[in-house]
């Protein structure tokens, strides 16, 4: 069996106790074939980038690289998160592009390739993750690496016209043709990529999954919707409700229903619109006043990026405004918490919630939606209100699917979810849970790696 090499910006080191579902799945993949995980060390240093660190866990190697402050700023804080991230999430208005930061991103990708190439063997399988590392495969090929290489984009790919507005797009997205397989979250992402290659990439969309790059190199693009450890989350949530922090939240609610949302504090998640929809609910359906508590857990993210600082200020103000307007001495409609919780506490919270409110404006997949479903009590499941612009909406079709820009419809869906009879809740939940049991995180990584291993798709 070929050795697996995973490359991603962040690396989940073995001693890290709070590794998420993806990290656990990739670790399991590494364990099956023996392997190496390569990425950024999480350290910003004064010296030049490139110092490597290695941690071993049995046969597995974790090799990470320090980045200088300057490289980290250009590559991560700026080009990845102020140019690519907004563009990929359909927000050209927020794109901040400079040639310098683009050059920094390319420089860091080239350095990743320079440091990784000597560690690779001829028959390795390399799996590169996400928008931070789009050109890495091409830099590795330039260094003579000929092994099978796959790339998975965890975020959406927008329409070709948007992609083409990014300066240097042809060179950047053309680099995807250096991989053998490019994975996306949804079929629509793949369709948009094929259109991009044809319309702006000077390449060709061929039969089936095949494409030809501008240089004639043939490669494949296919969708592989990422998933969760369904059985693990179900077991964790059943145990989670017995935790003291979960019981404390329950006690604090009295007999009120809980609607829960958990998101990184990011403009793609649509938090201001969601808060306004809660306010709209209380106007359109006043019977929920005093009867519903909405808990938004939103750990701060990318705090050195100005757009995230602006959002944080906006949300603090909006929460105050909405609570000031609707609250009673013994009730506030919105609880807004800027910190992270361990996964077992979160799954316990999901299980005791009557409603999961997942309304991003754009999201590659959204694993909170899937985890909310997996965490429910089969005999008394809560209802998921889900944005049609989350990749998960393609699979979780029995959720109450909403347009997050239409505040009235979100408010009405919350009302419908709160009033939904038990039999309907069970029927909808069972259908979604069947889907998640059939397509879990293990199935996701196996289907990607099997497709990558097979030479003709
Ligand atoms: O959604 C894309 C993604 O890379 C996720 O895989 C990850 O959870 C998140 O963004 C983390 O962002 P950051 O590494 O910038 O904190």
Image: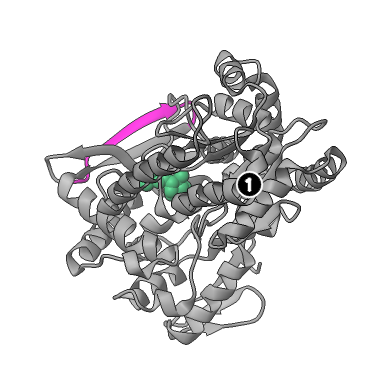
Residue linked to disc 1: 227
Q: Is mark 1 within 8 Å of ligand 1?
A: no
Q: Magenta stretch containing residue 15, yes or no?
A: no
Task: List x then y, in percent, for residue 258.
Answer: 62, 33
Work out whether 201 lies above or below 412. Answer: below
Task: List x then y, in percent, for residue 29.
Answer: 58, 41
Work out whether 421 lies above or below 245. Answer: below
Task: Please say whether residue 235 is visible from this viewpoint.
Answer: yes
Task: List x then y, in percent, for residue 245.
Answer: 54, 17
Work out whether 421 lies above or below 331. Answer: below
Point out the residue furthest to the left here: 46
Picture quadrant of residue 32: top right
At horizontal 70% and vertical 30% (from top left) the residue drawn is 234
* Span shown in magenta: 49-59
Task: List x then y, in percent, for residue 452.
Answer: 59, 59
With 238 as the anchor, is 34 left or right in this view?
left
With 309 as the anchor, is 7 left or right in this view?
right
Please name whichever residue, 435 or 92, is drawn nearer the observer in this view of the structure.
Answer: 92
Label 1 Cα crowd, 10 Å radius (few <14 / some 14-19 / many 20+): many
Q: Give the SS element for disc 1.
A: loop
Please name whichever residue, 297 or 78, is drawn nearer the observer in this view of the structure.
Answer: 297
Task: Please say whether residue 450 is visible from this viewpoint.
Answer: no
Q: The C terminus is located in which quarter?
A: bottom right
Work out whether 147 lies above or below 356. Answer: below
At horizontal 60% and vertical 38% (from top left) the residue drawn is 289
Picture quadrant of residue 251: top right
Q: Magenta stretch containing residue 57, yes or no?
A: yes
Point out the residue furthest to the right here: 423
Structure colour scheme: one colour
Q: How many marks?
A: 1
Please name whichever residue, 311 or 376, is drawn nearer the observer in this view of the structure.
Answer: 311
């Amino acid at each position: 069996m070929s050795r697996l090499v995973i490359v991603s910006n962040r690396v989940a080191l073995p001693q890290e106790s709070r590794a998420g579902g993806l990290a656990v799945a990739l670790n399991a993949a590494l364990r099956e074939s023996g392997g190496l995980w390569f990425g950024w060390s999480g350290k910003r240093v004064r010296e030049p980038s490139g110092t490597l660190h290695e941690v071993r866990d049995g046969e597995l190697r974790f090799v990470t690289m320090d980045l200088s402050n300057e490289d980290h700023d250009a590559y991560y804080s700026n080009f990845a998160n102020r140019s690519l991230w907004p563009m990929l999430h359909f927000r050209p208005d927020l794109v901040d592009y400079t040639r310098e930061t683009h050059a920094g991103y390319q420089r860091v990708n080239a350095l990743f390739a320079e440091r990784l190439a000597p560690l690779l063997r001829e028959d390795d399988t390399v799996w590169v993750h996400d928008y931070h590392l789009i050109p890495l495969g091409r830099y590795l090929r330039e260094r003579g690496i000929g092994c099978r290489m796959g790339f998975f984009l965890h975020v959406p790919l927008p329409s070709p016209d948007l992609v083409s507005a990014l300066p240097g797009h042809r060179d950047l997205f053309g680099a995807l043709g250096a991989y053998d397989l490019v994975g996306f979250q949804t079929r629509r992402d793949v369709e948009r990529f094929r259109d991009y290659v044809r319309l702006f990439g000077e390449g060709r969309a061929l039969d089936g999954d095949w494409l030809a790059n501008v240089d004639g190199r043939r490669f494949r693009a296919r969708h592989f919707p990422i998933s969760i450890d369904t059985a693990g989350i179900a077991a964790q949530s059943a145990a989670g409700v017995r935790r003291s922090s979960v019981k404390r939240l329950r006690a604090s609610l009295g007999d009120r229903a809980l609607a829960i949302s958990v998101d990184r504090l990011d403009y793609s998640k649509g938090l201001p619109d969601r808060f306004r929809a809660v306010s709209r609910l209380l106007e359109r359906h006043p019977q929920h006043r005093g009867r519903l508590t909405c808990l938004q857990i939103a750990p701060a993210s990318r705090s050195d990026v100005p757009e995230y600082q602006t959002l944080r200020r906006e949300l603090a103000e909006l929460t105050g405004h909405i609570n000031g307007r609707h609250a009673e001495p013994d009730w506030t409609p919105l609880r807004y918490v800027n910190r992270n919780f361990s996964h077992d506490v979160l799954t316990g919270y999901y299980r005791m919630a009557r409603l999961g409110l997942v309304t991003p404006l754009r999201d590659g997949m959204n694993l909170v939606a899937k985890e909310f479903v997996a965490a429910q009590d089969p005999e008394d499941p809560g209802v998921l209100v889900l944005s049609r612009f989350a990749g998960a909406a393609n699979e979780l079709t029995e959720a109450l699917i909403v347009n997050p820009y239409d505040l009235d419809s979100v408010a009405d869906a919350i009302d419908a979810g709160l009033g939904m009879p038990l039999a309907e809740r069970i029927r909808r939940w069972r259908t979604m849970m069947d889907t998640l049991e059939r397509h879990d995180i293990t199935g996701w990584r196996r289907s990607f790696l099997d497709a990558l291993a097979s030479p003709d798709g």
